[in-house]
Every structure is written in structure tokens, then in C-alpha cells.
Image (cartoon, grey):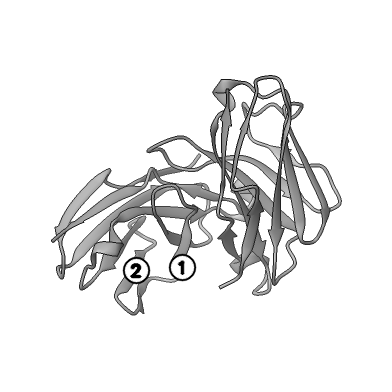
Amino acid sequence: GAVVSQHPSRVICKSGTSVKIECRSLDFQATTMFWYRQFPKQSLMLMATSNEGSKATYEQGVEKDKFLINHASLTLSTLTVTSAHPEDSSFYICSARDEEGGLQSYTQYFGPGTRLTVL
Amino acid sequence: GQNIDQPTEMTATEGAIVQINCTYQTSGFNGLFWYQQHAGEAPTFLSYNVLDGLEEKGRFSSFLSRSKGYSYLLLKELQMKDSASYLCAVRGSIKAAGNKLTFGGGTRVLVKP
């Protein structure tokens, strides 16, 4: 299957600092990437859809000024958690859409995730 | 809106078979996915169904009935490494749901010796 990388895998930061997480599709181009957050023993919650060359689409309740998304190329999307606080501590997972089979039948592949701990 | 239900936990014995059910009510339907997720790791793709019927892939099979809004994932010859969470995800239609995936809460499967 397709490979999606994510960096860093773990990050610990102080409250008030900003953290950038990178997501790359390694062997396919992805015009659309997704950012999810997952709390322990819970399912994935979609935060936003990242669109190459245009603004991200945020889900209801997600602050766009706090979670900045930049999809600068067909293989890279970044999520910046600005002014992080302890309640932002979570497992952040990106996903990229492989649309080779067409928009109706794409498969979505996930990165390995980033464990963020805000002290 | 999207609503996807699956059992929270299941326990099975090594070598046995386990069936994980998933029912859904969604805004349009454009395919159903099953993912496996080990603790602390990202989900990995297992299967995809868009037409009714059974898709078999080695020890894993997935079934879909669109009229019933129902799918199941069948795990055969269970191994200890199959202990994980299994996520059912439905892709909505482009018009109604932006072609996005909505995930169920996941089913934690514990395989015992």
C-alpha cells in the first residue's frame, strides 16, 4: 500500500509554545490530506481537510487560528498547534488520499501519528 | 448526518474466528473501509467494500449489505498479533458528506491463548 510519513513521532513542549507536525505522501501525490485527533480509547475525530493550493476546511468546533494547516505541495501538509496547552495533548494523525482510482474510489492511507504532550 | 455503530470490545481465543459487525446510517454512501489499529499506532488499511457481497483477503474477509446498512469484518485463524482495535469507516457521498470518511468508535479485540 501507499506510504504516508509523519514527523515528529513524539513531541513534548511547554505550555504556550507552538508545535509543527509534517505529513508527507511518499509514493503518490495527494491533493487532499486530512488531520485527525485521537484521545485514548476513542475513535478518530476529523479536525480538518487540507487542500493543496487552497485553504483548509475545518470541522465544526475546531479553531482554525489555533490549528494552522498549510498544504504547500502535492506531497506535504503541515499542522501547527499554536500556543499549545495541556488540553491539546493528544495523538494527531494525518491521512492522505490516493486518488489514482478516481475521486469516487480513492483509498485513504494514514501516517504513523504524532504523540503531543504539552506540559 | 453520519452514525456508525460497532461493538466496543470482543474477546476470542487464538485459532478461532471472530466477526465484528458494523451498522451505519449516513448521508449518502460511497464505500466502507475497515482499518486495524494497534495501541499507540496509526490505523492500517484492511479492506474496502462498495458493492454488496464478500471480499476475501487472506485471513480477513469483509462483507457489505447496502440495503441493510450493515457490514462485518471476519477474522479467521486468530493470532495473538491480531489483538487490536478495528475501525469501521464509511465514506459519504461527495454532495452530502464531502466524500469524507466517518469512523465508528472502534472494536477492541483481545485474543487469548
Splitting the image into 4 quarters, where does residue A46 fall?
Answer: top right
| Residue sitting at x 33%, y 79% | B58
**Looking at numbered disc 1 in the image, what kind of residue is underneath it?**
Tyr
Q: Mark 2 lies on which chain?
A: B
| Residue sitting at x 68%, y 68% | A99
- Residue nearest the viewer, comparing B25 with A107: A107
Percent of width and height locating residue B90 = 48, 54
The answer for how far apart the CA atoms under marks 2 and 1 are is 8 Å
**Looking at numbered disc 2 in the image, what kind of residue is underneath it?**
Ser
Question: Are the two marked residues, 2 and 1, in contact with CB atoms closer than 8 angstroms?
Answer: yes
- Residue nearest the viewer, comparing A53 with A79: A79
The circle drawn on residue B62 is 2
Percent of width and height locating residue B16 = 14, 68
| Residue sitting at x 50%, y 53% | B42
Q: Earlier in the sequence, mark 2 or mark 1?
A: 1
Percent of width and height locating residue A75 = 76, 61
Quadrant into which the C terminus of chain B falls: bottom left
Q: Residues within 10 Å of mark 2 (few under 14, many from 20)?
A: many
